[in-house]
Image: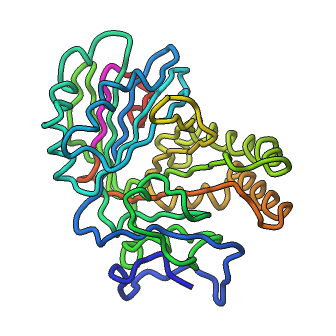
Amino acid sequence: MDSAIPKHLRQPRQCPRSTPAGYQPPFPAWSSRFTPLTGQVVMAYFGVQARHALGLIDLAPITERFTAANGPAHWDAARCVDAEGFCNCMAIAYWDDVGAFEAWKVGSGFSAWWQHGDRERGPLGWFMEVVCPTAERFETLFSSVGVPEGIGHLATHLSEPIEEHGYWGSARDRLPIAQVDGLLPGAPVFTGSDAGARQRCAGRDNLCLIRSGQDWSDTCDQERGLYLNDVRPVLEAGMQFLRDEGAGIGCLSCRFMQVLDSASGEPLEKTFGLACFDSLANLEGWAKTHPTHVAIFGGFMNYVQTLHFQVQLRLYHEVAVIPASAQFFEYVNCHLGSGLLSR
């Protein structure tokens, strides 16, 4: 059985693993494999916000620039309604090189457009949330092969089935940096500006970002009914808790996103939770002990056991733990509860 940590990132452990002795995962899962990444990747979340409904067309000033030189290797579109009742439509874009990202921002005209005073006026708010982890600071997990998601689109292939999944603490065991670093949280480090309608948030060391997705497009009959009637309601309840009450357990922001077709803008049978925690430990704490996640995990286990582990539902996630110096969060003409503004 393979390890989630690729060979070139393995090193003698200073921090112990949580893998139980003699552990055998109850079902297979895989991790993305990349041509060795020598620098930072870019996970960029561009958004538009309004009190009225929004769609892919409202993101066009950003997404139309993705075809310019040095554009992203992959991007997704999604939307949600936040706790204040505002619609947020987002383009999530990935680069495998920070230099290319910076060149794209200038060469495509994005930077000039973003900085223009028109962004600070009118009915629309705009936001840009960017994290740039190195390869040892993020991990991926897939329940099936053949359908990449998120940063997995930048991978060359998937691992063999891995050992480190299906038990509490497995996400930490999949992170290469966690072999030698306890990933303790840091206080916010303010390096930006707070000027009227344009506000920049502080970064913080070891901010933990998770994108965790569900694709039920290939389910049918009994499985589809079980997912939509039994699993999805408790998933939505957990995401709503993190969105509305998560601050008390270290969740700084949570959005439950409906994926949109990036060509037509039509909703797909795919969702994902997108959350930032102030530490990996607090994400782990919510996952292991909070009633909302216990219900999610229990519902999923009942689901797969009912179907004898023969499921068409596809699950994935990516987790990154990022230093303050590799974070950028700016909100223009947005309400004060947007993203990380209120935390």
Q: Over which residues does the magenta segment extend? A: 328-333
User: x%, y% of residue 45?
Assistant: 37, 40
User: x%, y% of residue 257?
Assistant: 55, 37
> Is 122 left, or right, of 118 in this rendering?
right
- The color scheme shown is rainbow
| Residue 39 lies in quadrant | bottom left
Q: Residue furthest top?
A: 122
Quadrant assignment for the C terminus: top left
| Residue 217 lies in quadrant | top right
> Is 42 left, or right, of 210 in this rendering?
left
Q: Up-down: is 123 above or below 190?
A: above
> What residue appears at the point 56 percent right and 57 percent down from the top-left corner?
316
> What residue appears at the point 58 percent right and 79 percent down from the top-left corner?
163
| Residue 269 lies in quadrant | top right
> What residue appears at the point 32 percent right and 50 percent down from the top-left corner?
73
Q: Up-down: is 272 above or below 282?
A: above
User: x%, y% of residue 280?
Assistant: 47, 60
Q: Main secondary structure of the magenta part?
A: strand
Q: Does the magenta stretch include residue 116?
A: no
Quadrant assignment for the N terminus: bottom right
Residue 18 or residue 35, whichever sits in front: 35
Residue 216 or residue 236, whichever sits in front: 216
User: x%, y% of residue 240?
Assistant: 63, 37
